[in-house]
Image: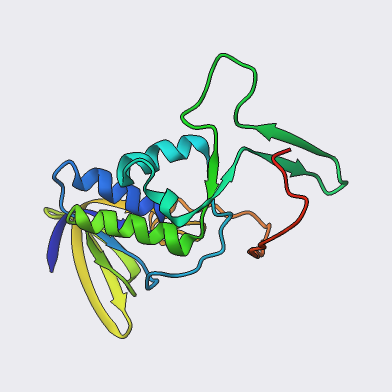
Amino acid sequence: MSHHDVAIVGAGPAGCTAAILLAERGLNVTLLDRAVFPRDKPCGEYVSPEARRLLDRVLGQGTLEVEQPAFLNGMRVVSPSGTSFVGHFTAAREFNGYAEWGIALPRSILDQYLLRAAQSKGVFLLERTALESLERSTRFGRTLKLRQGQHLGSITARLVVGADGLHSRVAKQLGLARRGSLQRVALVSHAYGVDGMSGA
């Protein structure tokens, strides 16, 4: 059984960013995810101007621009009745945020940048690895029972971070999961060359 300072369940943007920041502080970090990367994932693929501050911090300023993301200067919110309003990231006010633009970038691309950055900091990545259970604390920390295909194994970590999303296995194991009755279906599509698009 291997021992780690931190085990992060979920290797998406939140998990990778946490892994990078913790590894920069000299901690031994393992990142695990059920998926194999790169992978497509239903997602709004939207990074706010303020979130760009954190991405620039962990990836380097302007790193993602080589991928030619869509630059977003605001958003339009539309209700089921058709009523809508537009909000812009910059306006006639004294306060200005980190950037004037948000960006949109497929998760298959964004995740790869973050994973490479994490691994460059010494973070150990376990793909195709699911958390089976969180066991009681020992002198080494929490024990995580893991499954890789038919293989069962375990690691220990002094700190466990649950970055595994809506159906978080970590939250369930700790009795923190809260689910309402609303069930959702997420669909993602990409459109190119659409006429009549503007910043308004």
Q: What residue do we see at 49% from left, 32% from top?
A: 99
Q: What residue do we see at 49% from left, 54% from top?
A: 68
Answer above or below: position of 111 versus 92.
below
Q: Quadrant of residue 189?
A: bottom right
Q: 175 or 106: nearer the eye?
A: 106
Q: What residue do we see at 50% from left, 26% from top?
A: 97
Report x, y in % for residue 53.
41, 36
Tell me the colour scheme of the image: rainbow
Q: Quadrant of residue 62?
A: top left
Report x, y in % for residue 135.
26, 62
| Residue lying farthest to the bottom in this orientation | 150
Report x, y in % for residue 111.
40, 59
Q: Is residue 121 left or right of residue 190?
A: left
| Residue lying farthest to the right in this orientation | 81
Quadrant (top left/top right/bottom left/bottom right) for the N terminus = bottom left
Residue 164 shows in the view:
no
Report x, y in % for residue 115.
31, 59
| Residue lying farthest to the top in this orientation | 94
Q: Is residue 151 left or right of residue 72?
A: left
Q: 125 or 84: nearer the eye?
A: 84
Q: 130 or 178: nearer the eye?
A: 130
Residue 20 shows in the view:
yes
Q: 46 or 11: nearer the eye?
A: 46
User: How many labels sit on residues?
Assistant: 0
Quadrant (top left/top right/bottom left/bottom right) for the C terminus = top right
